[in-house]
Image (tube, rainbow, N blue to C red):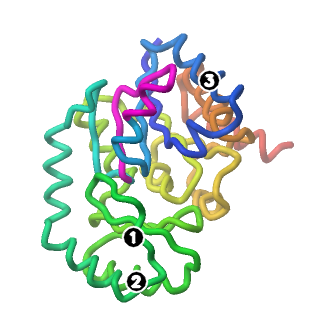
Amino acid sequence: MPQTILATDLDGTFLGGNEAQRAALYEWIAQRRSEIVLIFVSGRGFDFMRQLARDLPVQPDHVIGDVGTSVATGADFAPIPAIDQWLDASWPADRVQQIDDIVRRHPELQPQPPHSGRRRSYFYRRPEPVQVAATELRRLGFDTLMSDNQYFDVLPRGVQKGSTLLRTLAALGLPEHRTLVAGDTLNDLSMFQTGLTGVAVSNREAALDHAITPHTNVYRSAQPGAAGVLDALQRFHQQGDFNGFISSHRLSQTTV
C-alpha cells in the first residue's frame, strides 16, 4: 500500500482525547509504521517535542515546530538546510527589535516562556486591544496569529504551519496528494488552506470551524482529538482516494 503522510497538530489533536483514544491511534500507526510518514506540526518548540518523542510509543519522522518557524528531520532532529535558509531570510535579526518596541506599548500582551523558532509569542485575555498591536505589526511586514482565545504569535510574513509544511514536503520529496493534515485551532487553519486533505477534530475551536466552511478539502470529524485523527486516517489510508472520501462524506451529511 502506498505511504500516507500524516501531518498533525499536537495539543488537542494528536495528544487530544482520552487515554484509550490516544492508545488506539498510536497502536494503529505502530502496526503500519512502514506505511505512515508521521510529521508533528505544532506551536510547541523542539525541547517539548524531543521529550514527547521519547515518551510516545510512536516517534515522528519529521517535525515542524514553533508555528511553522522551525523544522527538523529524523530522530536526532537534524536541520533541513533548504528550509532553514528560507526561514532565516524571512526573520532578520534587526526586525525583532521592532516587534519588541511595539509590544512594549501594549501591556495586555504578556510574553510566553522562552522558546525556539523565529517568532515572538504572547498570552492575551481580551482580543480587542490586541487587534491594535496586530495592525501595527502587520504594517511593518509581519504576520500575526490569534488562536484558542489566548495565544498571540508574531511570525515572519508568509510563514505559518501550512506554508512551511508545503516546503517541507517538497524538500523531502513527499507527495501532497498522499498527505492528511489534522488540527483543532486557528493556528492550524493555514494547513487547511493549503488545499491538502484535512481533518478538523470535533473539539475544534469555534473560530476554526467557521473559517474552514468554504474549504471543501476538510473533513469535520465527529470524534475528538486522537479519535478524530484515527477516524480520518483509517479511511484515507485504506481508501486511497482522499478527495473521493471527502466528497462522499459531504454527500452523506446533506442526505441524512
Per the image, label 1 sits on a secondary structure element best described as strand
Q: Is residue 56 magenta?
A: yes
Q: Which residue is mark 3?
A: 234
Per the image, label 3 sits on a secondary structure element best described as helix
Quarter occupied by residue 126: bottom right
Q: Which residue is mark 2?
A: 133
Of residue 212 and residue 149, the one placed in the foreground of this image is 149
The reply, left or right, for residue 255 in relation to residue 189 is: right
**Amino acid under disc 1:** Thr
Per the image, label 2 sits on a secondary structure element best described as helix
Q: Which residues are magenta?
A: 50-66
**Amino acid under disc 2:** Ala
**Amino acid under disc 3:** Gln
Q: Residues within 10 Å of mark 2 (few under 14, many from 20)?
A: some
Question: Which residue is drawn at the image coordinates 34% and 69% (left, top)?
Answer: 143
Question: Which residue is drawn at the image coordinates 35% and 37% (left, top)?
Answer: 63
Q: Which residue is mark 1?
A: 144
State if disc 2 and disc 1 touch (CB < 8 Å): yes
Q: In x, y percent, where is residue 98?
A: 22, 79
The earlier-in-sequence mark between 3 and 2 is 2
